[in-house]
Image (tube, helix red, strand yellow):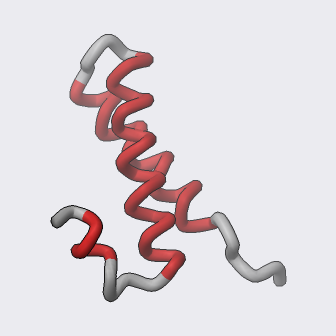
Amino acid sequence: MALSACANMSARDQNTAIGAGLGAVAGSVLTGGSAAGTVGGAAVGGVIGNQVNKPPR
């Protein structure tokens, strides 16, 4: 069911969501479960995921 939610998303949107999810997990692990670390990791991961496959200027 979780994968079907991404069916209508663009590749960039999917990368952003995946990056945010992975960033949240990494932030949580690196900060010992801190809420701020989890949110910060999600934000950083989302930005990185959003920039993946971005056409060069």
Q: Is residue 37 left or right of residue 46?
A: left
Kindly identify the residue that appears in the image at 40 percent across and 29 percent down: 27
Q: Is residue 55 left or right of residue 19?
A: right
Q: How many numbered marks are there?
A: 0
In the displayed structure, 28 sits above or below 20; it is: above
Extreme-right residue of the structure: 57
- Residue 9 picture location, percent across and down: 37, 83
Q: Quadrant of residue 14?
A: bottom left
Kindly identify the residue that appears in the image at 47 percent across and 53 percent down: 19
- Residue 1 picture location, percent across and down: 16, 66
Kindly identify the residue that appears in the image at 26 percent across and 18 percent down: 33
Kindly identify the residue that appears in the image at 40 percent across and 51 percent down: 20
Extreme-left residue of the structure: 1
Q: Is residue 30 left or right of residue 38?
A: right
- Residue 34 picture location, percent across and down: 26, 20
In the displayed structure, 57 sits above or below 37; it is: below
Instruction: Quadrant for the C terminus, please.
Output: bottom right
Q: Quadrant of residue 38?
A: top left
